[in-house]
Image (spheres, rainbow, N blue to C red):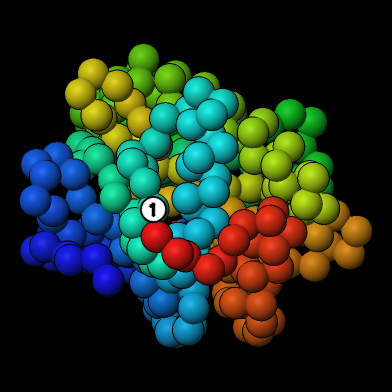
Amino acid sequence: MMELGELKYEGKGKRLYSTDIPGELIQQFKNDATAFDGKKHDVIAGKGELNCAISSFFFEHLQAAGVHSHMIARVGSDTMRVHELKMIPVEVVVRNVAAGSICKRLGLDEGLPLERPLTELFYKSDPLGDPMINTEHAQLFGWASEREIVHMRQMARKVNTVLIDLLKSAGIQLIDFKLEFGHLGNDIVLGDEVTPDGCRLWDIDTGNRLDKDRFRRDLGGLSEAYTEVANRLHINLEYKG
Ligand code: UDP
């Protein structure tokens, strides 16, 4: 068991603890599942470990492809050591196929393939329910400069191509996902997590949902679906240290 320092931050899906090294934190993945701005909540045994394993796997592959993240290393079954970032309060969503909020907003059918990947920006604010914004809002309110938004969108598109390829080899279609970024010195790197909590993943053949929509829509079998994603990607779920 890893020694955890002071709890610095607790979100819906993760906790961040201080460590004895300045600028480094421990990120712990919780078993809590939430949806609809936290109005729906449940605890799902094993989810924290699954998400930690899956996010570590994606961060390692992204690093190899030149996309840096806050992860330093996985250090426990549900914990990773990370760089402390100055978070940018703008979420970047990438969509390959219409699903979720864009269907409601624009009256699209779920499953409509998009001609090219679409990026969208949302202001990270729980009380406001993460409203959609554009680059001008981010600039005007000082959340990110135009250059930083361009850079985050570029990184998000690169993440998309890396994840599409990885998942395709596992028979999974990447529908959409959400990323968060932060400042690390003079760089902007990926923060937060890349897990089925923040992606839509459909079985290529059956369209079966292998992501958090199972929880949002009361389909059941969430941990079984996440385990399936991990197994198909040949992720070793036994953390041995
Ligand atoms: N997403 C997320 N956190 C959020 C909002 C969205 O992780 O606060 C993810 C979500 O899981 C999906 C993608 O971003 O993979 C696009 O979500 P969408 O805008 O369709 O909103 P939702 O349908 O989740 O309300």
Q: Badge 1 is on which residue?
A: 74
**Label 1: few (<14), some (14–19) or many (≥20) C-alpha neighbours in 10 Å:** many
Q: Residue at x 64, y 70 (%)?
A: 227
Residue 130 can be seen, yes or no? no
The tally of labels here is 1
In the picture, which quadrant includes the N terminus? bottom left
At label 1, the amino acid type is Arg
Mark 1 sits near ligand 1, with its Cβ under 8 Å away: no
Residue 52 can be seen, yes or no? yes
Is 21 rendered above or below residue 226?
A: above
Q: Quadrant of residue 157?
A: top right
- Front residue of 68 and 75: 75
- Front residue of 139 and 187: 187
Q: Residue at x 28, y 45 (%)?
A: 82
Name the outermost residue toward the top.
147
Name the outermost residue toward the front.
240
Q: Quadrant of residue 8?
A: bottom left
Is 219 rendered above or below residue 167?
A: below
Q: SS at mark 1?
A: strand
Q: Please provide percent x and percent y for residue 85.
A: 23, 38
Q: Residue at x 17, y 65 (%)?
A: 4
Q: Residue at x 39, y 36 (%)?
A: 69
In the picture, which quadrant includes the C terminus? bottom left
Is 160 rendered above or below residue 227?
A: above
Q: Quadrant of residue 221?
A: bottom right
- Front residue of 231 and 42: 231
Q: Please provide percent x and percent y for residue 239.
A: 47, 65
